[in-house]
Amino acid sequence: MRIAVVTGNPKPASRTHGLALAVADVLAAELPRPAIPAEAPAPPAGAGPAAAPLVPSAAPAHLVIDLAEHAPSLFDWSAAELSRLTAEVAATDVAIFASIATATTAWPASSRSPS
């Protein structure tokens, strides 16, 4: 099972990025891995072919994209590297998107109560 981790934070290798990677690791540990045939020892002379036992496959490395590393081309729709990364994320089984959110509230002066 292939997992993509995409983070959007102005700081490269941010805490948000680290948390998203930790989530991907926990998720990868919990998801089942497809079984693949193990190499079976050669059968004794005169015996039929031996069936290889099945063993869990190794988890593939996560696809990790830290958008801070691609900041100069984020709004360039012709950026080939971002198009390639988009296709790679689309081809994964699971995608984790993590971003920092900041909010500010500005109250209009007319809505404030008098002091």
Image (cartoon, grey):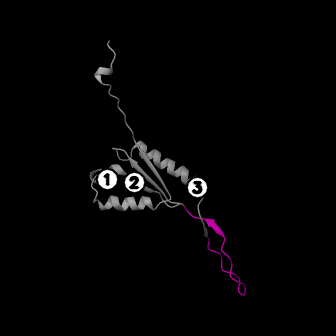
The residue that mark 1 highlights is 70
Which residue is painted at 55% across and 49% down in the image?
26
Q: Name the N-terminal-most of marks 1 and 3.
A: 3
Which residue occupies 59% across, 53% down? 30
Q: Which residues are magenta?
A: 37-58
Q: Secondary structure at mark 1?
A: helix
SS at mark 2 in the image = strand
The residues tagged by marks 2 and 1 sit, at their Cα atoms, a distance apart of 9 Å
Foreground pick, 90 / 64: 90
Name the N-terminal-most of marks 2 and 1.
2
Q: Amino acid at mark 1?
A: His
Q: Is residue 59 above or below residue 101?
A: below
Residue 52 colored in magenta in the image: yes
- Earlier sequence position, callout 3 versus callout 2: 3
Residue identifier under label 2: 65
**Contact flag, marks 2 and 1 (Cβ < 8 Å):** yes
Which numbered tag is attached to residue 31?
Answer: 3
Which residue is at a point 43% across and 58% down the rendered structure image? 89
- Mark 2 Cα within 10 Å, few/some/many (few <14, many 20+)? some
Q: Residues within 10 Å of mark 1 (few under 14, many from 20)?
A: some
Residue 58's quadrant in the figure? bottom right
Rendered location of residue 41, percent (x, y): 66, 77
Q: For numbered disc 3, what is the local secondary structure?
A: loop
Q: Is residue 14 left or right of residue 41?
A: left
Which quadrant, please, contains the C terminus? top left
Amino acid carrying label 3: it is Leu
